[in-house]
Amino acid sequence: MREFQDSRRAPVRLVVLIVFTSMILTGPGAEQAASAEVQIAVPPPPMGWSSWNSFSNTVDAKIIIDQANAMVARGMAKAGYQYVNIDEGWWRGERDAEGNITVDAQAWPALAPGERAGDMANIVRYIHHLGLKAGIYTDAGMDGCSLVPDLGPVYKHVGSEGHYEQDFLQFAKWGFDYVKVDWCGGDKEKLDPAVQYAEIARAIAEAEAVTGRRLYFSICNWGDNSPWTWAPNVGGAPADIWRTSGDIVDPIVAHQKHSGRLASFPGVLSNFDQGIHPEAQHTGFYNDPDMMVVGMPGLTDVQNRVHMSLWAISAAPLLVGADLATLSDATLATLTNPDVLAVDQDSLGLQGVKVASYGDGLEVWSKALSTAGERAVLLLNRTGDTAPITVHWSDLGLTDSSPASVRDLWARKELGSFSSSYSATVQSNDAAMLIVHGGEGKLTTYTPVGADDMHKGQKLSIANVSSRVPVARVRISYTNTDKAPRFEELWVNGQIATRIAFPPTGSDNTPGAVWIEALFDRAGANNVLRFSPISGLEPRIESIAVE
Ligand code: GLA
């Protein structure tokens, strides 16, 4: 095995090649800045509830009030759930003469003295007074999904095309904090999602500038046109999520015509698998494998627990689809386990990756956490038989030389200290979820030569980069003295670029650090990382460190 050095303890022997516009400079890597740098917390994935899975287009103010109340009364708000998201069905596609959205006054009545029926600001005020946040829904096209409705009548023109500025400003003025933008109309018209969602992100930014309200952006085009390649920072969005697949299940609405539908565990696994794009998930941008079906008809308590584990290890948005008013105690415990939620919400914001597999279906997944030496680990058994699964510290990027402590997150119990590996017997279609805390593995640091001159809008390339693993964590040290995040594109070996957010670091003297995961598809020390400014306002990159 090749030797990698921890440059905090020893000088790095690798030669670092910097391509700085047309100049080529070489020099030794060094980690002068690393000891002083501050790890920057990035926005976590959103947590909340969405009306679609359990209410389809029957949604109205009464349902939203009941669900918001239940989110508080059942302790979910205390556990961290905050968004109450109104999905399709709230609007019938009607507008006034000026093109403003008009809504049904009976479905959305006045809720307090002085309010006007048919004003969506009423329900937003209700949600806000509980200390929660409110989400709304539209489509990027002219029509929405209710041309082929799951329940209820057909409504045309339930989309925002032609009204982007007007509608997103309206959502912000109503007080909404979150908007999900679907793609039924866009798909029907064969629009380009990368173009439309960029336009929408710009409309959102304008609405935010007018109202001073942040409107969180949720892209829902089911993975068409590989949104992970264009969605991070699309149209300048400071944080966003994008769906990576279709719906896990169509809505299951009690006492309605499809009430006999069932969610399925293979459907959960399929959406999980389709959601894994670690190279795109960083610095506040998240893959979204769909609203959860935890607690819905069709899944056992064990399957609910595995589902929750899968979403948490991948740092997926945690949007509950079940009816909160009728959750069983077991489901509630699954949704609110603080150790598991902390994995999902960890401030590095990285997605778990599969680090080992045995035969067909015994898998070890690992997610790096913000505490040095800590990994969340999932031992997943997809086979039909009970089997032992072993996680080796070396597979987690931890040192073999020191023992690691192991905690079982579902039992909420310390299991002890183990040297080099841990094995658990895992039942068929079950998973063990652990925190392993050991000695942090070594990173190799690459420092740009001539960094003082480096940040004048030129491209910055670092060549001869090697990594121990194909999907490697990269820590980027930088400074951004601005008050807002700055963004850069990163190409690894000429793959499609990803846009990285660099939040403010405050002073110029103390660098901050954010983490990404990059696909190193070249063996040996042949990988090239190229950073490129998006606008004239880029961060100043001090160094990168690679696992
Ligand atoms: C699509 C989305 C779902 C939901 C429905 C509403 O299918 O993927 O999440 O919003 O539309 O019709």
Image: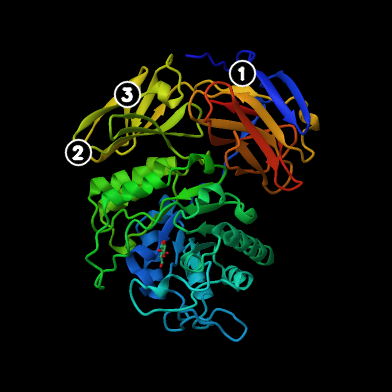
Three-letter code, disc 3: Tyr
Position of 226 relative to 65 (above/below): above
Residue farthest to the left, as pictured: 385
Three-letter code, disc 1: Arg
Quadrant for ligand 1 reads bottom left
Position of 11 relative to 318 (above/below): above
- Under tag 1, what secondary structure? loop
Q: Residue at x 46, y 24 (%)?
A: 397
Three-letter code, disc 2: Gly
Q: Which residue is mark 3?
A: 422
Q: Residue at x 66, y 35 (%)?
A: 530
Q: Which mark is residue 8?
A: 1
Residue depth check, mark 2 versus mark 3: number of the one nearer the observer = 2
**Is 197 on the left or on the right of 212, as rendered?**
left
Q: Are marks 1 and 2 in contact (CB under 8 Å)?
A: no
- Which image quadrant for residue 203? bottom right
- Spot occupied by residue 384 in the image (x, y as percentages of width and height): 19, 38
